């Protein structure tokens, strides 16, 4: 089992910044890829960004150039730095961990609200 705990969400004005954190615990050696997803009210959950164990990153087109995903292996934590936030970034943000075996793990989510 892998447990994920997100933090760092909140209310911010458009153009502002937030940094989300996701701390992993448990069988972290089984993690192959970590990611951030988000779900806005009335919409399906969508992929935002992923980071490999080697630090390689990929981003959805909607956040490319504004969001940066990083990791601190010593702290078993990944981050999502979100800059130039827009009202359409408002959503619950979830941390995800793909594993060598078993289903992926999900955090409980953290709310991000961007006011116009």
Image (tube, rainbow, N blue to C red):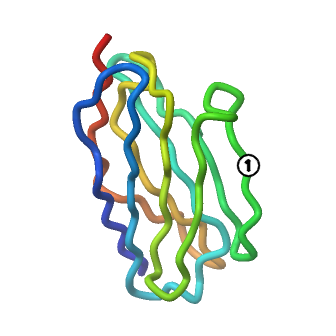
**Quick check: 8 left or right of 27?**
left
What residue appears at the point 32 percent right and 23 percent down from the top-left corner? 114
What residue appears at the point 43 percent right and 23 percent down from the top-left corner? 15
What residue appears at the point 58 percent right and 41 percent down from the top-left corner? 67
Q: Quadrant of the C terminus?
A: top left
In the image, residue 21 sits, relative to residue 43, either above or below, namely below
How far across and down, in percent of the image, does residue 4 sit? Answer: 37, 68
Q: Which residue is mark 1?
A: 58
Q: Secondary structure at mark 1?
A: strand
The number of numbered discs placed on residues in the rendered structure image is 1
Few, some or many C-alpha atoms within 10 Å of disc 1 (few <14, some 14-19, many ≥20)?
Answer: some
Q: Quadrant of the N terminus?
A: bottom left
In the image, residue 59 sits, relative to residue 104, either above or below, namely above
Residue 53: name its quadrant: bottom right
How far across and down, in percent of the image, does residue 14 sit? Answer: 38, 19
Looking at the picture, tell me which residue is in the foreground, 15 or 3: 15
Outermost top residue: 116
How far across and down, in percent of the image, does residue 109 sit? Answer: 31, 49
How far across and down, in percent of the image, does residue 52 sit? Answer: 71, 67
**Quick check: 57 left or right of 37?**
right
Outermost left residue: 11
Residue 60: name its quadrant: top right
Residue 51: name its quadrant: bottom right
What residue appears at the point 57 percent right and 89 percent down from the top-left corner? 29
Looking at the picture, tell me which residue is in the foreground, 28 or 75: 75
């Amino acid at each position: 089992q892998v447990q994920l705990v997100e933090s760092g969400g909140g209310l911010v004005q458009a153009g502002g910044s937030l940094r989300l954190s996701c701390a992993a615990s448990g069988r972290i050696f089984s993690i192959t890829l970590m990611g951030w997803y988000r779900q806005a009210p009335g919409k399906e959950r969508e992929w935002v960004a992923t980071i490999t164990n080697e630090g390689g990153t990929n981003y959805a087109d909607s956040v490319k150039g504004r969001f940066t995903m990083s990791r601190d292996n010593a702290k078993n934590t990944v981050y999502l730095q979100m800059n130039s936030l827009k009202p359409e970034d408002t959503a619950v943000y979830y941390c995800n961990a793909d594993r060598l075996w078993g289903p992926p793990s999900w955090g409980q989510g953290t709310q991000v609200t961007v006011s116009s």
